Image (tube, coloured by chain):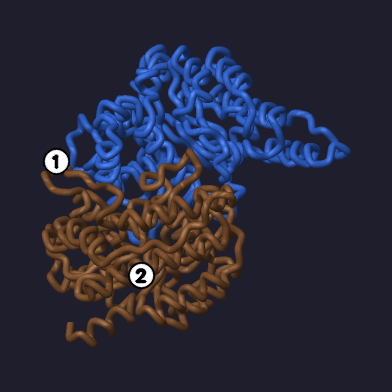
Chain colours: A brown, B blue
Amino acid sequence: MIIDCHGHYTTAPEPHTRFRTAQLAHFKDPAAPSPVMPRVSDDEIRESIETNQLRLQRERGADLTLFSPRASTMGHHEGDEAVSLSWTRACNDLVHRVVGLYPDNFAAVCQLPQSPGAPLAQVIQELRRCVLELGFVGCNLNPDPSGGHWTSPPLTDRHWYPLYEAMVELDVPAMVHVSASCNPNFHATGAHYINADTTAFMQFIQGDLFRDFPTLRFVIPHGGGAVPYHWGRYRGLADMLKRPPLDGHVMRNVFFDTCVYHQPGIDLLVKVIDADNILFGSEMVGAVRGIDPLTGHYFDDTRRYIDALAIPDATKRKIFERNTRRVYPRLDRQLEARGR
Amino acid sequence: MIIDCHGHYTTAPEPHTRFRTAQLAHFKDPAAPSPVMPRVSDDEIRESIETNQLRLQRERGADLTLFSPRASTMGHHEGDEAVSLSWTRACNDLVHRVVGLYPDNFAAVCQLPQSPGAPLAQVIQELRRCVLELGFVGCNLNPDPSGGHWTSPPLTDRHWYPLYEAMVELDVPAMVHVSASCNPNFHATGAHYINADTTAFMQFIQGDLFRDFPTLRFVIPHGGGAVPYHWGRYRGLADMLKRPPLDGHVMRNVFFDTCVYHQPGIDLLVKVIDADNILFGSEMVGAVRGIDPLTGHYFDDTRRYIDALAIPDATKRKIFERNTRRVYPRLDRQLEARGR
């Protein structure tokens, strides 16, 4: 089977989006009406999914998508801790309903109610709720809840350890995923996302996080940011900084998806990164929605790039399915329970 | 001939470094002694160059290096505007002396006396001094003088236009190059540098800078950051954002160096980026100083990667020499005057 490890609910029904707008308006001006949780009908959800993610999943021949709330609207930098919590719960609950309607096609990954400078208690609580009560199999962790000002400590800092303890206990990985940028220097999907991926990887080289948490796992999306292209630089920096070689120091715990939107990029990824560390992903419907005039196919139809690789079928099977089941063991158990 | 477009004086003599330490100490505590400009002897300069950059240039078979002050110690975020100016002048004067001692081996590129939030008057004045009085052929422009907090406007903002007017008038390009990071999230050479490269490129896509300055030229170092690896993403984003195709919109004015420290990265670069936009560079003695155990050669011996490419000799000649002479016309004229 083909599992897409990286899909977002970028097409959530309009009442959901309207709730967010009203919520932020109320935060800015408490005289504005306090919104109530939106009523979104099953039909509205079906409509938004069947004409988008599900249609594309079928057209492109994937079987299941790890599905999380839209990343760019997590907006951890907007409002405050309470706003982040109520918005995050609404987003996760909506994803939960999608999975309830299409259990064969989607498995749920949660947004976390982060807020710049806030402690992690509510983040851990929401992770527990999603995993233990709603059957989520992973989470998205934002290394920069300030939205482009980078005011939080690095991911290797002890600040994050309580969350990592919960992730290890629950046996769920995190995808490292920033949200929108409120810094005009950084276009969200063109700079902030890719920079965050690169930044997180370098933090993992500098730190000793996986000595403290040998079973903690991160997926770095967008093909690992700049890392595979600069793989020699990172191997060399690890050496210069007297860190252990990357295979044992970082690559037992860190995985890259395949959201790289052209064949030469995927070729490079698979050439320099061990296939055990690569998870199929497309981020559709996502960052880049058009058709590549050079190929006549959608940029984000990443399955085509993997299909075109001259690698053994067993290796493709790792990338398409086995690695993701290994990194997301709760997904694996859910699939096994359904005979898949 | 082989021109390395990216070399820094990372081995400057100790009195120079001591001056900087004393300068910053005086800034923090005006009761500390105000340092005088360091006396550095020709012999000290010769020693620092001949045992390092010149030795490696000869060993690796390059002919000339575009040489600028050490990037990581530009430190625009330290001190204030006056500190930045006096330090920058000291750095540029030192590079000028290197070129005076080894005019066949080095040509000078200047640091700019930037300071977060400061106007550009002294930046332009120092650029003029270096180019018109000292024969410099280009400059390094820091898109984030805050050192990792990204508080300046994007490179496409009108804030920068007076500098661009001077660059166009003087016919010198800028390499987009940040300095050290004072944000613990960003390792300088492992994250901040690469992020800045990626960020600048995306800003150029979003803006219309080269409509306003059709002859303005930038070199984005470190192989263009993440850009070539994500070339499909950038082509797709240009399309989604209703920007013109990248070849006319950005790639008449933007060039990437070859500071990518492994063969697969260089292979990708040359595959996806037009050879006219690639300038040979090594950044030695620089970010990564060790030997790659996979090859037995220095990571930053980037000439080997170009030599190994299965591309026509005429294309290699573009990368090694002709593109750099085109992008740095003042260098070209200096070389022609010397019969090279």
Q: Position of residue A94 (x, y in %)?
A: 35, 66
Name the mark nearer the viewer: 2 or 1: 2
**Rendered position, A117 above or below B178:** below
Chain ID at mark 1: A
Residue B59 quadrant: top left
Quick one: SS at disc 2? strand
Residue A11 badge: none
Left or right: residue A76 versus residue A42 is: right
* Quadrant placement of the C terminus of chain B: top left
- What is the CA distance from the residue labelled 2 to the residue labelled 1? 34 Å
Q: Nearer the viewer, residue A154 or A248?
A: A154
- Report which residue position mark 1 lands on: A294
Q: Amino acid at mark 2?
A: Val
Q: Residue at x 47, y 54 (%)?
A: A75
Tell me the tag on residue A109: 2
Residue flagged by tag 1: what amino acid is it? Leu
